[in-house]
Amino acid sequence: MANISLSRRRIFVTLPWPGEALDRLRATGVDVHIWPGDDAPPHDELVAQAARSDALITTVGDPIDEAVCRAGDGRLRIVAQSGVGVDNIDREAAIARQIAVTNAPGVLTDATADLAFALMMAVARRIVEAEASVRNGEWSGWHPSGFLGADLKGATVGIVGLGRIGSAFARRCEGFDMRVLYSASSSKPDAEARGYAFTPLNALLERSDIVSLHCPLTDATRGLIGADELARMKPGAILINTARGAVVDTDALLVALRSGHLRGVGLDVTEPEPLPADHELLDFARVVVIPHIGSASDFARTAMIELAVDNVIAVLSGGEPIHSVL
């Protein structure tokens, strides 16, 4: 691909990226424009850039909606998402204007599964809460009942969405002799062969000590975990979400936390995202909230932008996208 010439093509990248992938893109002769700073560009900037770009390289924080696609009509050829989820992209609007939409599957699987497992450990063993007591000078010494946490060995974990990441998370749970239940659109022979039990969502919620969410955000999964679902969870259960914040009804989650129904919650994603500094979720010591870092490993972030660049080069060269989601 490095020998391909794409001169006079213009690419807009919504955030700076580590690694050398964007240098490889420049080597094809394209004009690469990168939005500066740590915050995503505002919507009106996305609209303006779509109107004068042949490709957009985007992240989950970029709303590629009807207005953006309409602005790009006639020039914009591809929206290359640098992650797996594409719930921020209006795919119907893109299809109507023959704009390719691609993503970067596979490369962030292990990083996100590791992070979900780390969150589960942190919540179950109250690691963040305990560390804060030391840092704040509140810990006065060892005590038999100090920071008692939940045991993971032999616990039942319910996984909602057994795709690449959910499956990788399940394999990590095997190492702790955890019983794995999973809810998905259909049973999976490979999962059954590993001893995972295909379980309807309501039964999974009722039987699991830990529930971990790994489903994509769609119309069907938005608000999937609401008041009724949270009430079905075992008293003292743990909820982990590394999928999308909107899979969980935040207001219902606050009610469950105020009542003490849940033992703890670990969130890499929230609704809204980011949370305001004064949001009530941050008032609970048993809630661990981290800033959407599931894919934040050296390998994953480098591979994500590499795949996005590969998709851009393929489409602008007249070929088929490598990882189309349309």
Image (cartoon, grey):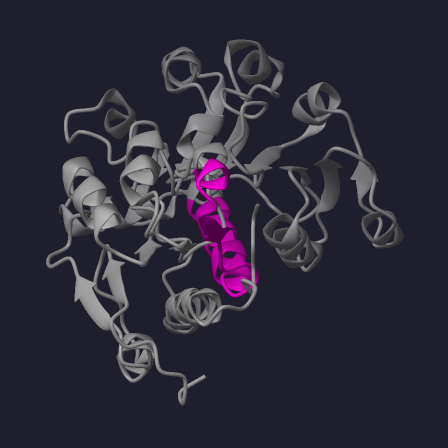
Look at the image and tell me whether residue 64 can be seen: no
Residue 236, given in percent of the width and then of the height, sits at: 54, 24
* Quadrant of the image containing the C terminus: top right
Q: Quadrant of residue 179?
A: top right
Q: How many labels sit on residues?
A: 0
Question: Which of 309/247 is in front?
Answer: 309
The answer to whether 109 is drawn above or below residue 64 in the figure is: below
Residue 240, given in percent of the width and then of the height, sits at: 49, 37
Look at the image and tell me whether residue 7 can be seen: yes
Residue 30, given in percent of the width and then of the height, sits at: 26, 74
Question: Which of 114/103 is in front?
Answer: 103
Identify the residue at image location x=25%, y=56%.
Answer: 53
Identify the residue at image location x=61%, y=53%.
Answer: 169
The answer to whether 295 is drawn above or below residue 124 in the figure is: below
Q: Quadrant of residue 233?
A: top right
Identify the residue at image location x=49%, y=60%.
Answer: 104
Residue 246, given in percent of the width and then of the height, sits at: 43, 27
Question: Is residue 120 a member of the stretch shown in magenta?
Answer: yes
